[in-house]
Amino acid sequence: MPSDQGDGVDARSPKDRHGRSILSNTLLARPETPALLFLILLLAVFSVTTKGFFSVNNFIGILEQGVIIAIVGLAVNQVILSAEIDVSVGSVLAVCAFIYGNLAMMFGGNLLPLFATLAVGTAIGLLNGVLSTYGKVPSIITTLGALFVYRGLILLLAGAQVLNVPKTSRVLGLSDVAGIPVSVLLLVVLAVGFYWVSTNTAWGRNIYAVGGNESGATTLGLPVNRTRLIAFVLSGAACGLAAAGFLGQIGQLQATAGTSFELRVITAVVLGGTSIRGGRGSVFSPIVGALLVGVILNAMTLNRVPGTMELFVLGVLILLSVSSEGIRQRYLEKKI
Amino acid sequence: MTENRSEKAWTGASWGNPFGKLGRTTVLAIIFIFQIILTSVLVPGYFSVWGLLDATRAFVEVGFISLAMTLIIITGGIDLSVGALLALVSVTIGFSYQAGLPLGAASLLGVIVGVAGGTLNGLVTTYFRLHPLVVTLGTFALFRGIAFAVSDADAVSNFPQWFSVFGQYKFGGMVPAQLVVLVICAVIFWLLLSKTPFGRYVYAIGHNATASRFSGVATQKVTVAVYAIMGLMVGLAGLVHTSRIFSARGNAGFGLELVAIAIVVLGGARILGGSGTIWGTVMGLLILSYLQDGLSFAGVRGDIGLTIIGCALILGVFLNENIQKFRK
C-alpha cells in the first residue's frame, strides 16, 4: 500500500531500509504527528486549567465547530498539496449558504438545497481552477479576487435579507445518530474517501508529484493543470457541502457570514502539518488542524478571552507553523 | 515570448526606450480620458474640476500603498497585510493618543509601527525563505487581530482640530494637501525605480533572483528594504486615513490589499515579477479610483465596488499573462 503523505515514505515492508520499524516510519514520521501530540497536550492542559472544558457536551461543541472547517480543509489541503492556494472559501461558503437558505425557505427539504449548493460550489471551484491553471492567473490572484467578488455580490444582493431556515431543513446541522452529529459522520466518510483516493488513484498520487516538483511532474508527462483543476473543483464542492452544515448549525444568516473563514481553514491545514510549499502533508492534516483550532477557540471562549482576539491567535498560529516549515527546510539544506 | 517581454521591461522600464515603456501607460491614459468624458456625459453634474480634485481625497491613501506595492510586485512578491497594517497604524495613533501620548508623538509612533510591520514581513520572508504570500497572509490576521484586540471594537475620534491637516487641508481650497504629497512620492518612487542602482536590483530580483544573488546583488537586504518601504507608505496612508475620517478603528482599510494589487496589475506589472512601472501604476490608480467615484456619484451601492475591483484584478492578470502569447 503506498503511503498518503508524500516525501517518499513507504510502508510496504515491516522494516524499511534503515531498519526502522513501521511504527516509527508511519506514525512518528507522519506530517500530522507533531500537531496531534500538540492537540493531546492542549486537551490535557485545558482539561486541568479550564473549568467546563472537560465534558461530553463541550467536546461535541468543539467537534461541531471544527467539522465545518475540516470538511472544507480536506479539499483545500489538496489544493495546498499541489502548491496552489485557495483563499476564497469564506465567500464561497457564504454564497452557498445563502442559496441553501433561500431554497430551504422557498421549497423546504434538505436534498434540493444541498444539490443546488453543491452545484454552485462546484461551478465556482471550476471557474477558480480554470483561471488558475489554463488561464495562467496565479491562484492567489484568482481566489483573492473571487473572495471579494462574491462577498460584494452577497452584500449587494442579500445585505438586508434576514434568513431564518426552518428546522426541517437543518438536518446536516442539527440531527445526530446515537449522539454523534450527522456532520461529524459525514466528515468521517469524507476523510476515508479522501484517504482512499489519495492512496489508490493516479490523481491522488499526482497531487504530491505536482506540488513537490512541478517541472519534474511536467517532464514525466503528468497532467499538471488537470490535477490542480480537480483540487480546485473539490474545494468549491466542499464549500457547498459545508454550507449546508454551517447554515444547519446556526439557522440564521447575515451578509458577513463566513468572513475570515478562509483563515481558519488555511490555519487548520498548515497547523496540521501540510507544507505550504506543497508536496508534503497528509490527508488527515486538516482534521487534526481543525480540532486544534476548535480546541483553542473553545478554550478562549471558556476563559472569557474577547472574541476580538481570534484573528490575532490565528495569525500567530499561521506564522508559527509556516516558520517551523521554514526551519525544517533550512535544517534539511544544512544536512545535505 | 515571456522572456523577451520581461527583457524589454527590465531594460526598457529603467533606462528610457520610451516606446517599450510608454506603450501601456499611454493606452491607459487614453482610456482614462475617455472614461472621464463618458462618465461626465452619462452622469449629469459629475464633471467639475473641483469635484474631480475633491475625489482624490478618497484614493490618495491607496495611492501611497500602490506605489510601494509596485516595487514589491516587481520583485515577484506580494503583500496581503497592507489593509490590516493600516488599521493597526490607525489604532496605534488613536489609542496611544487616548492613553495620554501627545498627538504628534502618537502619529510618529503610528508611522514607526507601519515600518516595523513591513520590516517584519520582509525579515520573515527572507530568513525562512517563505513565499511572501503565506507570510503576509499570517501577518494580515496578526495585524488585524492586534488592531481589533487593542481597540476592542471601540473607536477614538476626539482628536484636536489641528489633526485634520493631514487629511482634510486643501491648498487654495482646491487641491487636497495629501494629493500634493502623493505626487511628490510618485516622483520619488519613479526616480528610485528608474534612476538608482536600488531600482535596478528590484527589477533584477524579480527577473531572476538566483542570478541576481550570484551577480552580487544583496537580494535579502533589497527585499527587506522593499517591504520596509511598504511599511513606511502604509504608515503614511494610515496617518492620512485617520486624519481624513477623523477616527481610529480596527476595521479600517478593509480590502485595501485587493485594491492596491489590482491597481498595480492594471498598470502593467506582471504578477510574477520582473516588470512594471510607476507611471503605469499611477494610471491604474486613476482609472480604478475614478471608476468607483463615478459609480458612487451615479448612486450605485458601494458594495459592488468590491466585485468590480475583484473582476478587474483577475481580468488584468489574465490579460497580462495571456496577451504575450498573441505577441508571438
Image (spheres, coloured by chain):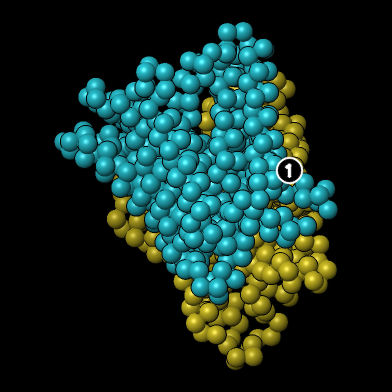
Chain colours: A yellow, B cyan
Task: Point out residue A197 in the picture as x, y percentages from the top left corner.
Answer: 75, 62
Residue type of the residue flagged with mark 1? Leu
Is B189 above or below relative to B162? below
| B67 vs A326, nearest the viewer | B67
| B235 vs B53, nearest the viewer | B53
Residue A189 visible in rendering: no
Total numbered circles: 1
Q: Residue sitting at 57 percent across and 8 percent down?
A: B45
Chain letter for the residue marked with disc 1 in the picture: B
Q: Residue sitting at 67 percent across and 12 percent down?
A: B42
Task: Point out residue A170 in the picture as x, y percentages from the top left corner.
Answer: 62, 32
In the shown orientation, is residue A252 left or right of residue A304? right
Q: Residue sitting at 30 percent across and 26 percent down?
A: B165
In the shown orientation, is residue A288 left or right of residue B19? left
Task: Point out residue A268 in the picture as x, y percentages from the top left corner.
Answer: 52, 54
SS for tag 1?
A: helix
Q: Residue sitting at 44 percent across and 48 percent down?
A: B230
Question: On the image, which quarter does residue B35 sit in?
Answer: top right
Is B64 above or below relative to B221? above
| B290 vs A79, nearest the viewer | B290
Task: Point out residue A127 in the picture as x, y percentages from the top left corner.
Answer: 74, 42
Label 1 belongs to which residue?
B319
Which quadrant, please, contains the N terminus of chain B?
bottom right
